[in-house]
């Protein structure tokens, strides 16, 4: 087994910005603890920050975009996926209006990502239909 490394990082579960220390061996996260030197959490973590990291190494995790074609999900390039999204959003907005579009922001995103998400909805798509589980 390779040497164990300790990697300091910021938790990706919400926008709080808690400091974490990852115990990594063979390029795999083995354990997570709070970073006692982090001013936000001073070594404390929530249950998600401490234990919900197995998804990082999940074999079922998507590595590329999927687009449904003829009823089947098929791999696509990022360019194809972005083009598809842009076309569908434009089509919905033109056909049904801005209020037909809504977006759900993720609590595992950073505050900055959630800010850009709401700005995109309001400024580009002209919709205030945005919600997220990070408001609770």
Image: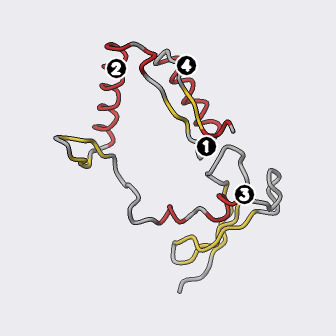
Labelled pair 1, 2 in contact (Cβ < 8 Å): no
Label 3: element kind: loop
Q: How far from the left and from the top, in percent, is residue 111? A: 65, 37
Labelled pair 3, 1 in contact (Cβ < 8 Å): no
**On the image, numbered disc 2 is attached to which residue?**
92
The residue located at (30%, 25%) in the rendering is 87
The residue located at (67%, 54%) in the rendering is 10
Sequence-earlier tag: 3 or 4: 3
Labelled pair 3, 4 in contact (Cβ < 8 Å): no
> Front-most of 41 and 97?
97
The CA distance from mark 4 to mark 2 is 15 Å
Sequence-earlier tag: 1 or 2: 2
Sequence-earlier tag: 4 or 2: 2
The residue located at (66%, 58%) in the rendering is 49
Q: Quadrant of the C terminus?
A: top right
Label 1: element kind: loop
Sequence-earlier tag: 3 or 1: 3
Q: Which mark is residue 107?
A: 1
Label 4: element kind: loop
Disc 4 crowd, CA 10 A, few/some/many (<14, 14-19, 20+) = some
**On the image, numbered disc 4 is attached to which residue?**
128
**On the image, numbered disc 3 is attached to which residue?**
46
The CA distance from mark 1 to mark 2 is 26 Å
Q: How far from the left and from the top, in percent, is residue 95? A: 31, 13
Give the colouring mode of the picture.
secondary structure
């Amino acid at each position: 087994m390779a040497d164990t490394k300790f990697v300091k990082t910021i938790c990706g579960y919400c926008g709080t910005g808690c400091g974490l220390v990852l115990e990594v061996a063979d390029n795999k996260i083995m354990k997570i603890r709070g970073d006692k030197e982090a001013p936000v959490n001073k070594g404390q973590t929530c249950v998600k920050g401490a234990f919900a990291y197995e998804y990082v190494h999940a074999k079922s995790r998507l590595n590329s975009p999927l687009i449904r074609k003829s009823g089947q999900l098929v791999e696509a390039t990022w360019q194809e996926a972005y083009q598809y999204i842009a076309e569908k959003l434009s089509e919905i907005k033109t056909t049904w209006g801005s209020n037909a579009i809504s977006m759900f922001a993720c609590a595992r995103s950073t505050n900055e990502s959630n800010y850009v998400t709401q700005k995109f909805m309001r400024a580009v798509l002209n919709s205030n239909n945005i919600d997220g589980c990070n408001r609770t």
